[in-house]
Image: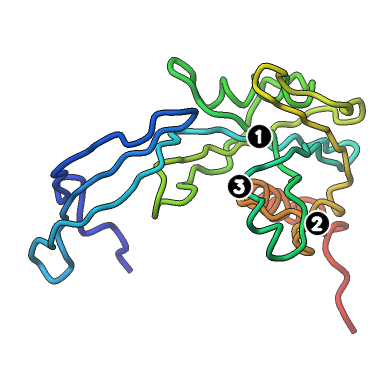
Amino acid sequence: MNIAPEFQLNDVEILSDTRVYDGFFKMHSIELRHKLFAGHWGKPIKRELFMRGQAAGVLLFDPIQESVALIEQFRVGALTTSKHNDSSPWLLEIVAGIVEAGESAEDVAIREAKEESGSEISELVPICEYLVSPGGTDESISLFCAVTDCSNLSGIHGLEEEGEDIRVHTLPIIDAFAAVESGRINNAATIVALQWLELNLLKQHPALKKPESN
């Protein structure tokens, strides 16, 4: 089955693009039209686009201890969800950060691992790159896995000038997988990274397979 896209960038016409907010993040109001599957051009539509750009995240994995290091921090975007389902806006996440001008995603993964967890990493295994929420933001994230020694990773980290207050947790991978299943881990990048790890580990470590039910 061929699932290549029928349309490309030149099948979209930008009629206007206005920056309507210029703060820590940016917001644009865009009027555009695009080709329709029926074969003709659609009517002009207006969309607000939250400009976040590219980010990078890295899962810190210790194959010797069979553990991962995750970080816990407050997230304003989780406030509404927390009110609805009585959960916490302090999330368990992989290390991550925004790619700045002149940086590569790999650069950011290595830098953020040091800043947010105190981990020194060098070799990165690519996991995937995906669009975070393309219905309203341009943000994409490149995910990696890094093999590191998690035994001494702990404490509170982050840059004070950026308002960061980050606590490191090192936990067995089976507990991390269980936290995904229970919903304690509920952010996409961490779920994707841990599920990638689980799929790859199950190929190499049969002892980690879930026991079969009778």
64 relative to 195, above or below: above
Question: Given the image, on which type of amino acid does mark 1 rest?
Answer: Val
Question: Given the image, on which type of amino acid does mark 3 rest?
Answer: Gly
According to the picture, the residue beneath numbered tag 2 turns out to be: 179
Label located before the other in sequence (3 or 1) = 1
Give the image's coloring scheme.
rainbow
Question: Given the image, on which type of amino acid does mark 2 rest?
Answer: Ala
Residue 86 versus residue 185: which sits nearer the camera? 86
Task: Calculate the distance from the C-alpha at mark 3 to the C-alpha at mark 1.
Answer: 21 Å
Q: Residues within 10 Å of mark 3 (few under 14, many from 20)?
A: few
According to the picture, the residue beneath numbered tag 1 turns out to be: 58
**Mark 1 secondary-structure assignment:** strand
Q: Residues within 10 Å of mark 2 (few under 14, many from 20)?
A: some
Whole-percent x, y for residue 40 in the image = 7, 65
Quadrant including the N terminus: bottom left
Residue 52's image quarter? Answer: top left
Give the residue displayed 59% in from the left and 29% down from the top: 97
**Mark 3 secondary-structure assignment:** helix
Q: Residues within 10 Å of mark 1 (few under 14, many from 20)?
A: many
Of circles 3 and 1, which is in front? 3
Q: Find residue 77 and name its label.
A: 3
158 relative to 146, above or below: above
Quadrant including the C terminus: bottom right
Label located before the other in sequence (3 or 2) = 3
Residue 39's image quarter? Answer: bottom left
Residue 22 versus residue 9: which sits nearer the camera? 22
**Mark 2 secondary-structure assignment:** helix
Of circles 3 and 2, which is in front? 3
Whole-percent x, y for residue 152 in the image = 91, 25
Task: Calculate the distance from the C-alpha at mark 1 to the C-alpha at mark 2.
Answer: 18 Å
Q: Is residue 47 left or right of residue 201?
A: left
Label located before the other in sequence (1 or 2) = 1
